[in-house]
Amino acid sequence: MAIAVLASLAAGVCFAVAGVVQQWAAATRPDAEALTARLLAHLARDPLWRCGIGLAVVAYGFQSLALAFGPLSLVQPLIVAELVFAVPLSARLHRLRLGRREWFGTLAVAAGLALALLSARPHGGDPRAAGPLSWLTAVGATAAVVCGALVTARVLTGPWRASATALAAGAVMGTQSVLLAATVDRLRHGLLTALTAWQTYALVAASVGGLLLIQSAFQQGPLAASMTVLDATEPVVAVTLGVLLFGETVRTGWPVSAVTVAGLALVAAGIAALDTSAVVMALHGRRGRDGRDRTA
């Protein structure tokens, strides 16, 4: 258990630094590149961005180690602690100081998400339980959420725009987690079984699409507006689809459900506090400027 805790916290720190580095690089790209392949093509040539991707890979390694020694219900809430590291680090790099509002928003998202995950404690399920109609319904619902979020992002400005794009990214990455579980299950029955399953190719498409959406969210606004929404949306979508597709179970009843709802409400309040924060707006105003100084 001690190894699981330490590895989870190490994963959270690595994810935090990786997010800060990627956002720092993405913020230097022009708005016209958002949601286009050109954004990823240019970022792939940036050594700093590649360093961020490398740190993310290390973080996934720590996460895998943590899951080998502890349950998901312990590991995932601890990894959410990345927000407590990422948001202050991002502000520090931009030479800004977080006030009580910004600390409340950051801690509310992290604590609320951890509380919701701990109380719901999803478990069980069979990746082979979902039929074609269930998959079609789930993918269609996710696509509707993604399209709605991106359409909304087009009419928003400032940190809210980054948050809307991050919502789309989180929905895609939550679906990617479910597709990954289905693909891993098929790999247990042989490589040919996995290669002949549509979920394998949908996983690749979701991974690439999710990466593009994440970097676009990083490009459009400060880390506090994007990473918080991304971290909140991904597990909620993954757990919801896990329940609907795989028959996973979550703890319900009083007072568990009330605690879960309270945790999600705390997440929403934290995101709203950050997106309306003067400090976060100042971070948005500096988007790209510090990065151009870096490359000058």
Image: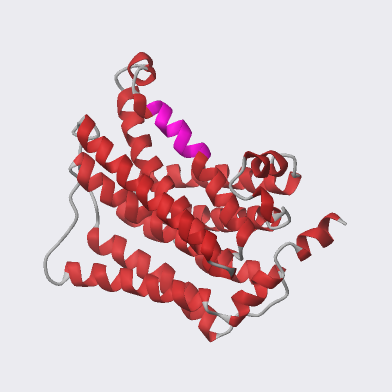
Along the viewing direction, whichever of 75 and 253 lies nearer the viewer: 253
Residue depicted at 33% across the width and 36% down the height: 181
Q: Residue furthest right?
A: 296
Q: Is residue 145 visible?
A: yes
Q: Is residue 192 magenta?
A: no
Q: Is residue 66 visible?
A: no
Q: Is residue 99 above or below residue 179?
A: below
Above or below, comparing residue 207 to residue 117 in the picture? above
At a point 52% along the width and 74% down the height, the residue shown is 275
Between 166 and 246, the residue placed more toward the observer is 166
Specify whether 72 is left or right of 287. Answer: left
Q: Is residue 244 left or right of residue 101?
A: left
Numbered range of the magenta stretch: 200-208
Q: Position of residue 144 (x, y in %)?
A: 36, 49
Please state if 243 lies on the left or on the right of 180 as rendered.
Answer: left
Height in image: 66 above or below 108?
above
Give the number of marks. Answer: 0
Quick one: which residue is furthest to the bottom in this view? 100
Residue 18 image position (x, y, % from top left): 61, 53
> Residue 269 location in percent, x, y?
40, 76
The residue positioned farthest toward the left in the image shown: 253
Residue at point 61%, 66% (across, down):
222
